[in-house]
Image (tube, rainbow, N blue to C red):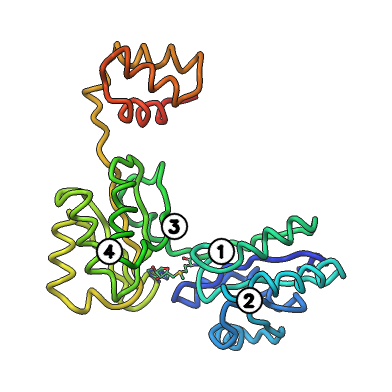
């Protein structure tokens, strides 16, 4: 394949199973003049496995802005560069945002080379609604901030997707149980694509118990998915929906929901969420 000069390639790498490395990823990483890697040693093992000899440079949260400038200069000079993270798709809870923004602002091309990402792998096998979902990345580490974030998400109707670290998985799922309720359905996807891959669904209370009762289930890497809050459809009866639709045709969604709530007496937030689901 031909490498486009002056382009930044954003290359996804496996999240555990090296068989998920794409042929295109290998060809791009072999063909560029430089690979910016979150951790040179970590990526070095992957590159060695695929016999890729391209030089690497470190690009992580602490040096990203400074390093981005030098990469932009090289792209403007006609060189092609690739970006990889330790696992999965760069920029997804990984460094790369500042680099991509700077490269695009400089007018250079950014070319994605798609592949594994834990959140989509998890969602695709979860059995939870996948038509609409939100990705929240990692929750804050401190209990107060974590609860505040969860409370903001309490009424969210879309499937919620979180990343979590092994040392926080038990307390995070317990906090979700406290905020979203013991009966909310959820799925934990652990060690995806690896030997101990486990995808386990239950109520949040059930998952909490399951995690606590087996230390093995607390090891490795986790994606936690929580079903969205149920839509209380019965409260949005046909007449309320008619009013809402009429208003939506005339004004922005938020204003329509506010006015419809005043007219019908139905909760504004419920109407807002309901309106979001209507085809526009
Ligand atoms: N960029 C990566 C992606 O595209 O998925 C995510 C990087 S983030 C720093 C690492 C987190 O992703 C882990 O803590 C875990 O929550 C999730 N993760 C990564 N690999 C995973 C796997 N094999 N199974 C389950 N979760 C995984």
Q: Which residue is mark 1?
A: 91
Is there a contact, CB below 8 Å, between mark 1 and mark 2?
Answer: no
| Relative vertical location of residue 192 with respect to residue 52 in this rendering, above or below | above
If you read the primary sequence from the N terminus, does the residue marked by circle 3 or circle 2 appear first? 2
Q: Nearer the viewer, residue 2 or 271?
A: 271
Tell me the element at label 2.
Answer: loop
Between the residue at mark 3 and the residue at mark 4, the CA separation in whole angstroms equals 27 Å
Nearer to us: label 3 or label 4: 4
**Picture quadrant of residue 71:** bottom right
Tell me the element at label 1.
Answer: loop
Between the residue at mark 3 and the residue at mark 2, the CA separation in whole angstroms equals 28 Å
| Relative vertical location of residue 22 with respect to residue 106 in this rendering, above or below | below
Q: Which residue is mark 3?
A: 120
Q: Which residue is mark 2?
A: 63
Q: Quadrant of the N terminus?
A: bottom right
If you read the primary sequence from the N terminus, does the residue marked by circle 3 or circle 4 appear first? 3
Q: Is mark 1 within 8 Å of ligand 1?
A: yes
Tell me the element at label 3.
Answer: helix
| Residue occupying image coordinates x 33% and y 77% | 220
In the image, residue 80 lies at what x, y percent? 78, 71
Between the residue at mark 2 and the residue at mark 4, the CA separation in whole angstroms equals 29 Å
Is there a contact, CB below 8 Å, between mark 4 and mark 1?
Answer: no
Nearer to us: label 1 or label 2: 2
Nearer to us: label 4 or label 1: 4
Q: Indicate left or right for 22 with 198 as reference.
A: right
Q: Indicate left or right for 132 with 95 as reference.
A: left
């Amino acid at each position: 394949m031909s490498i486009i000069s002056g382009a930044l390639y954003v290359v996804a790498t496996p999240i555990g199973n090296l068989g998920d490395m794409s042929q295109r990823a290998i060809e791009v990483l072999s063909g560029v003049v430089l690979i910016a890697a979150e951790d040179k040693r970590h990526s070095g093992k992957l590159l060695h496995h695929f016999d890729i000899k391209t030089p690497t440079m470190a690009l992580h949260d602490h040096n990203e802005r400074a390093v981005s400038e030098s990469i932009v200069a090289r792209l403007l000079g006609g060189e092609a560069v690739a970006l990889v993270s330790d696992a999965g798709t760069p920029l997804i809870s990984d460094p790369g945002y500042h680099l991509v923004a700077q490269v695009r602002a400089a007018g250079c091309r950014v070319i994605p080379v798609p592949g594994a990402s834990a959140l989509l792998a998890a969602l695709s096998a979860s059995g939870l609604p996948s038509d609409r979902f939100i990705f929240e990345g990692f929750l804050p580490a401190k209990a107060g901030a974590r609860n505040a974030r969860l409370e903001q998400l309490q009424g969210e109707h879309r499937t919620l997707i979180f990343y979590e670290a092994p040392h926080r998985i038990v307390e995070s799922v317990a906090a979700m149980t406290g905020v979203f309720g013991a009966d909310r359905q959820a799925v934990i996807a652990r060690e995806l694509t690896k030997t101990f891959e486990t995808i386990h669904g239950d109520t949040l209370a059930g998952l909490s118990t399951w995690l606590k009762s087996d230390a093995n289930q607390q090891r490795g890497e986790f994606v936690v998915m929580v079903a969205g809050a149920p839509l209380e459809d019965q409260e949005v009866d046909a007449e309320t929906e008619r009013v809402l639709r009429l208003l939506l045709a005339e004004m922005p969604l938020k204003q329509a929901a506010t006015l419809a709530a005043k007219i019908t007496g139905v909760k504004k937030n419920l109407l807002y969420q309901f309106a979001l689901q209507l085809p526009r």
